Image: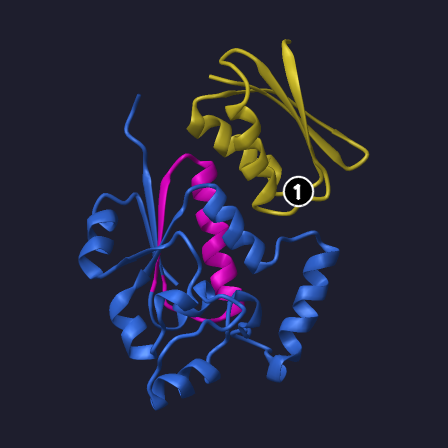
Amino acid sequence: MNIVKVLDAKGLACPMPIVKTKKAINEIESGEVLEIHTTDKGAINDLTAWTKSGGHDLLNFEEENGILKFWIKKG
Amino acid sequence: MKEKKRTTIVLFSGDYDKAMAAYIIANGAAAYDHEVTIFHTFWGLNALRKNESAPVKKGFMEKIFGKMMPRGADKMGLSKMNFAGFGPKMIKDIMKKHNTLPLPQLIEMAQEQDVKLVACTMTMDLLGLKEEELLESIEYAGVAAYLADAQEGNVNLFI
């Protein structure tokens, strides 16, 4: 995985994780991977839907001590 | 590149909570790469008011309206459990604990994301609101401009 950027969105509430993710994905190139850390439970569904709609790839998702981690490959 | 989708929201309400819902949806839609328009009419115009008063000429009724309506997003009341202004204080405290963006910051964020904020000029006249009293870099229009955006809309809401 070509992780070029890590976005720390921990503690932020809706709609900030998605807004920040959008900003961060704009800053990377197609094929590169963005890693996102968040604590917002809604983000699981939010990021899944957003990734699909935007034509990106959700490569992986992990939960670790209440921190949700996502890896999104830009489409 | 495929054509962008469009979200349009009519913000009629001047309630803090309803305006917050409108702006959260608007910010979310902007993150979805939609072109977003919020058309503010009637009490929703108060969300666009500056906190400080601007030197403008007004008639008697317009002055009364100006005094009675909330001056800016932060002064708006809740649609439920307002408790004469105590409700908003409580909810803002809770929002801080949950790290939720307050309404004024949601509006700023929307502007940063190029959400088009439109003030309805007809209701501005009714409520006696002048351009000088409203936020910078917003647009002024009527029903036709709104419909032009809305008829292309994938998501249309009236709040």
Q: Residue at x 55, y 18 (%)?
A: A28
Tint of chain B: blue
- Colouring convention used in this rendered image of the protein: by chain
**Residue type for callout 1:** Lys
The chain whose colour is yellow is: A
Q: Is residue B37 visible?
A: yes
Instruction: Place residue A43 in its image quadrant.
Output: top right
Q: Is residue B120 magenta?
A: no
Q: Which residues are magenta?
A: B11-40
Residue at x-position 64% and y-position 76%:
B87
Give the position of the N terminus of chain A as an image quadrant: top right
What SS does tag 1 mark? loop
Residue corresponding to mark 1 = A41
* Percent position of residue B6, x then y: 32, 41
Q: Is residue B143 left or right of residue A53?
A: left
Q: Residue at x 67, y 65 (%)?
A: B92
